[in-house]
Amino acid sequence: MKAEVIDNTLILYLEGRIDTANSPQVEKEVMEVVAENPGKELVVDAGELNFISSSGLRILMKLIKETGKKFTVRNVSTEVYEIFEVTGFTEMLDIRKAVRQLSVEGCEIIGRGSFGIVYRIDPETIVKVYREGVSLEQLQEEKRYATAAFVHGIPTAIAYDTVQVGSCYGNVYELLNAVTVGKAVTADPSRAEELGRKMGRLFLQVHETEMEPGVLPKISDKFRARIDYLEQNHLSHEDAELMRRVVDAIPETNTLVHGDFHEGNVMVQDGELLLIDLDSVCVGNPIYDFMSNYGLRKICANGNHKIARLSLNLEPELIPVLDKYERQEFLGSEDPAVLEEYVNTMELFFPFRHLLLIALEQSNRNLTPEAVEKIKAADLPVLRKNYQLMIDRAGQW
């Protein structure tokens, strides 16, 4: 049996078969190595393990007692995973299946965002490949979030597999002949009203969905963390405090917010809409979603046609057409005064939301040092001038 220590973690590599014939020897080797490395975190790698019998499982049980806590068994084959599942070991240990390799060479790109790219593998399958550095744990977290939204009635595509694409990880979804809403409208602009209204109703449904406390993170906490980052790297303490006061003024709710709701993150399949991008889903006040949705559109309207095409999958001239129908639906009104009030409120909050984008500079290639300085120069004076208006307006949501 091979073992190694990496960053205070002891990794045990199990291989072949572990059954009554060899389990005493395996147990002896395992326990000797563990005894030689007291206090280290334990990980069992099962990448070369083909079979484990009840006598082999007793070794793992002994390890649980020896370490006094749940440890990880990784790279588990489907066949061995079934043994762990049937015997209840998936409840006692952190069992992680092996990740299969997948190539996206030559595949159509059907969506692109700050955190990854969505490819079509075949007519029935798409894969969302996350940027390098996103961990398997983060992918599993998105799957948990998507499942939580799904069981509360949100039409969400659930990933059925996790794969590795080069040095990156991805989630695989089964979506027969589905395309993003942006691509559907770009291909057939006559569908703008139909799909725009469906987008608006889905947006409204998300914000009317109440979640149990603790199931999802709070978006206000994420915003506060971004402000902390900005204070450490870009803003004065005084400016960061202005931004914190805005967040503090927004009433807390326990309803869903998507975090990045737009036409490139929603698929249309047989006329029905499905959310596919839930890595940023949280609970909180809908105003956070409105700020994000409006802000992205304003950036596109200000001449960034590349983002319109890559992120929204829309030709720029179609954005205001969809905006009209979406807003009528999620605001529940066609009254021009209501729509104008919404736009005026979002304009007020735009500098606040735009500044927060800087906190994504390590993952967003569009945020060059020059772009960051440009955002600060344009938005900080407006934030300082209007922060009290934002606080007053925030309290009304």
Image (spheres, rainbow, N blue to C red):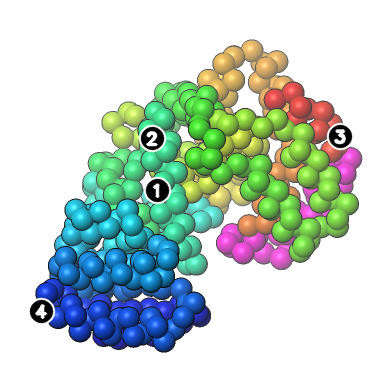
Residue assigned mark 3: 388
Residue, x 40% and y 62% (percent of image)?
Answer: 70
Query: Is label 1 in contact with label 2 (beta carbons under 8 Å)?
Result: no
Q: Is residue 271 left or right of residue 196?
A: left
Residue assigned mark 2: 150
> Residue 96: x, y in percent?
32, 62
Q: In the rendered image, which quarter contains the N terminus?
A: bottom left
**Start and end of the magenta stretch?**
361-385
Dominant secondary structure (helix, strand or loop) of the stretch shown in magenta: helix
Residue, x 22% and y 66% (percent of image)?
Answer: 57
Q: CA distance from mark 1 to mark 2?
A: 10 Å
- Can residue 315 be seen from the camera position used here? no
How dense is the environment of label 2, judged by Cα within 10 Å: few (below 14), some, or many (20 and up)? some
Frontmost residue, 42 versus 258? 42
Q: Is residue 102 left or right of residue 71?
A: left
Q: Is residue 169 above or below residue 251?
A: below
> Residue 216: x, y in percent?
52, 41
Residue assigned mark 4: 21
Q: CA distance from mark 2 to mark 4?
A: 46 Å
Amino acid bearing label 1: Lys
Frontmost residue, 316 versus 150? 150
Q: CA distance from mark 4 to mark 3?
A: 75 Å
